[in-house]
Structures are given as C-alpha cells and as structure tokens.
Image: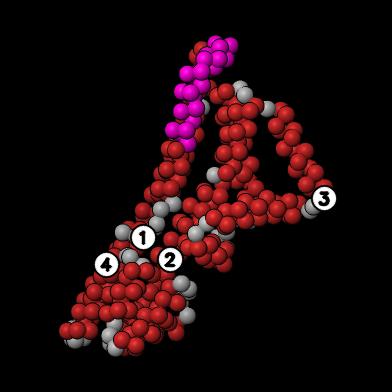
Amino acid sequence: MELIILLAIAIFVLAYRYNTGDNVYKFFADTVSGVYNTYAPYSYREVKEKTKELGYEYTPRQYMTQVLMIGGAAAGISFLYFYSVLVTVIYTVIAICFVPYLSYLRTQRLYSEYIFEQVQVYTTNVIMEFNTTQSFVKSLEGVRDSGILQDPVLRDVKRMIQMSYENGTIDQSIEFFNAAYPYYMVKNMHQLFLQITKEGARDSGEALELMSMDIDALVEGVYRDRMDRQVFHKKFLTFGCACFLLVLVMQLLFGRTEYLQMLEKFYVKIILHAIIMILCYFLVSGEKYYNEDVGVE
C-alpha cells in the first residue's frame, strides 16, 4: 500500500515539475474527457456543451478531486478487505474508470433541471401572451421575441412557428414540441390550445387561469421532489459507505490474525468480492436514480 502511495506521489511531482499546476489538472481531465467523448453519443456531447455554457461543468481541479476521493476510497476499502497490493490497484483503477460515468449522470441531471425550468417559462409565458393576442402562433412569437428563452427550447419554438406558417395549422407544430418535451404541463396546455383554436376563443380566460394554476402546482411538486431527492441522496451515500465498513466489524470480532487466515480460503475471497460488487452496484444504481430526469412525468 505504501508503495502505491509513493508511486502516485512521484508521478504527480514529476508531472508538476515539467508543467504548471493547472496544466497537470488539465492534462488528467482532458485525457479522461477525450476518451469518453470518443465513445459518447452525440446527444451527450450536446448536453455537455450546454452545461459547460451554463457554468455547470466541473473544473479540472474538481475532476482531480473526484479521482482522488473515489480512487482513495476504493484503495482503502479494497486493502481493508484483502490486504493485497495487486487487488487494491485493480479496484482503484476500476473505481477511477467510473468517474466519467458519474460525471455523465450529474450532467444529465443538471441539463434536465435546466430544460424543465425552460419548459416552465415557455408554458407560463405562452398562456400570458395568449391572454393578450388570442392567437397561439402570435403567443409563440411574443415568447420568442421576449428574450426569456434559451436554446434548445428557443430553437424548437422557432421551429414551431415556422411549421405553423408552412402547414397553415398548429397541429403538426404541437406534435413536434410534445415529442421533444414529453411533459404533462406541455401536453395539457397544447391540448387546451387545440380546443380553443378549433372551437373558438370564447370564454377561454377561465380555462387558461386554471391551466396556470395546474402548472404552478406541478412545478411546486417537482421542486419538492428535488429537495426530497437531495435529502435521500445524502442518507443513501452514508448508508452505502457504512456497509463497506462491515468487514472492519468482522475483523474486530474475529481478530486480524484469524481474518487473514480466513482470506487464505478461496471461497472467502469470492464472497468478499461478491459483497464489494453488490454494494458497488447498489451505490451506482442509487446514483442513477438520483440523477434521473427531473420533471418528466
């Protein structure tokens, strides 16, 4: 274990000697990012560019912190389980390889939250514009020109306006937007506008007011769910990390000497490997759940 630590320090010192501190961090971050981007789908690259534009992207130092924290935790836990330098190195490398995936999950969550906020702005302001213009397309143009929307929602609103003029009806444009943003508040609002457009705009004020109230209630529920997820996430990580330390309790009960003798049996090693893999799967699944789409009902 001491040899691994000294080797890591030596590599870092040599890299730091020939580069500035920022370049060292940038080298590690760019290497990992470059490899992942090679195999990542286009949709992820587009999402990543948007999160970088919004200032949500990790800095090189933050990436290095993630690598050191996750790698260090994996090294400590694996050595505590097996007291083997080789096994420790293998588990540490595997754990570090998960850093890009965890960053991907975080990026997806932040992008989903951003899109939900944009969709909320879109629905609320289209309703407000319609109360003035009494025209769905004019309402879209008002929201487009207001400067409150950003891409990709703004780009799709422009596409809706173009489709409405080309087809002479709003049906196709609504289908396009519903497919791109499958939110209840979007579908319900568009269905209401379809009914108003086809049946006339008589007495639409009350229906639009009720729709605004429904959207407010839905948004409140989504933000409450977001806070509940954050609380759950902290408890979940604490519980998951505590589960890894159960082997320490076992060593205290049996004694370290007895535990090392148990490690000589192959089936004990298999059981310990299985425990680590199950707990890791449990943690990664929890992270995936926490970072799932926000606001998509």
Which mark is first along the chain, 1 or 3? 3
Cβ atoms under marks 2 and 4 closer than 8 Å: no
User: Which label is found at residue 295?
Assistant: 1
Label 3 with label 1: CB-CB less than 8 Å = no
| Horizontal and vertical percent position of residue 199 | 17, 84
Give the spatial CA distance, label 2 vs label 4: 19 Å
Instruction: Verify CB contact (< 8 Å) between mark 1 and mark 2.
Output: yes
Answer left or right for 8 relative to 286: right
First reached walking from the N terminus: tag 4 or tag 3: 3
Kindly identify the amino acid type of the residue bearing the numbered disc 2: Ile
Q: Camera-side residue: 90 or 112?
A: 90
N-terminal of the two: label 4 or label 1? 4
Q: Which residues are drawn in magenta?
A: 255-280
The relative height of residue 236 versus residue 132 in the rendered view (above or below) is above
* Crowd around label 4: few <14 · some 14–19 · many ≥20 (10 Å): some
Q: Amino acid at mark 3?
A: Tyr
User: Which label lies toward us, 4 or 3?
Assistant: 3
**84 is higher (above) or lower (below) than 5:** above
Say if the magenta span includes residue 47. no
* Residue denoted by label 2: 115
- Disc 2 and disc 3: Cα gap in Å? 43 Å
Q: Using the numbered discs, state the Cα–Cα distance from disc 4 to disc 1 in whole angstroms.
A: 14 Å
Number of the label disc, if any, that sits on residue 18: 3
Magenta stretch, main secondary structure, is helix
